[in-house]
Image (cartoon, rainbow, N blue to C red):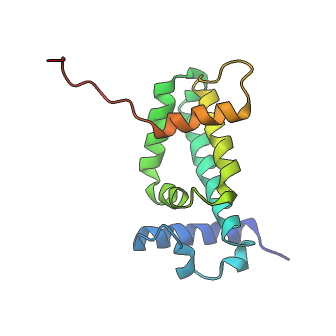
Amino acid sequence: MGITTLRRRDFMRAVLSSAQSTGDRIAPWQRVGDVDTHFDDESDLLVELHREWLRLLVGRLHRGEIVAQRSVGNVRDLYDEICDDNPTLRGILDAHEANPALWEPTSREHAMLARIAGLVPDGAGSEQASDLGRALVTQRIPVQRGAFT
């Protein structure tokens, strides 16, 4: 019969619950059970966790009508809100950002965000779009708090 999507999602929810209760962002699945029962390996689980992140991200981008607004500030603010609303999931993904299994999905995520924010010039390739999206979600512009003295 194989592994059902429902069983995989249940395992993912248990992993997130474990990570939330223990604070373990590196391998919370070890407390839940055998990853290989539900996924090919830990990398497969990480890719599925990233898919969950994208489901949340895309859902909020469309619900908030941010896609149509194409504002850098709106996209960045919404991204931060989703991070704040899902710190456990984001924490696991951040802890594993160097895992090669996440490179391509994260690159596509960043490219999508850059395009939605209107940062990608016509004719730009995927790599440039990804770089712009990565800058969008990682860099902060300092707020000027007063006049120069």
- Residue 43 horizontal side relative to residue 79, left or right: right
> How many numbered discs?
0
Please tell me whether residue 111 is drawn above or below residue 148 in the rendered image: below
Q: In the current view of this chain or complex, which residue is farthest to the right? A: 1
- Residue 52 horizontal side relative to residue 140, left or right: right
Q: Residue at x 51, y 61 (%)?
A: 95
- Residue 32 horizontal side relative to residue 6, left or right: left
Quarter of the image where the C terminus is located = top left
- Of residue 1 and residue 70, the one placed in the foreground of this image is 70
Q: Residue at x 60, y 67 (%)?
A: 12
- Of residue 58 and residue 40, the one placed in the foreground of this image is 40
Quarter of the image where the N terminus is located = bottom right
Q: Quadrant of residue 45?
A: bottom right
Q: Is residue 62 visible?
A: no
Q: Residue at x 66, y 31 (%)?
A: 128
Q: Quadrant of residue 70?
A: top right
Please tell me whether residue 105 is drawn above or below residue 78 in the rendered image: below
- Residue 114 location in percent, x, y? 60, 30
Please tell me whether residue 137 is drawn above or below residue 101 in the rendered image: above
Q: Residue at x 72, y 72 (%)?
A: 39
Q: In the current view of this chain or complex, which residue is farthest to the left? A: 149
Q: Quadrant of residue 4?
A: bottom right
- Residue 140 location in percent, x, y? 40, 34
Please tell me whether residue 19 is drawn above or below residue 66 in the rendered image: below
- Residue 43 location in percent, x, y? 68, 66
Q: Is residue 71 visible?
A: yes
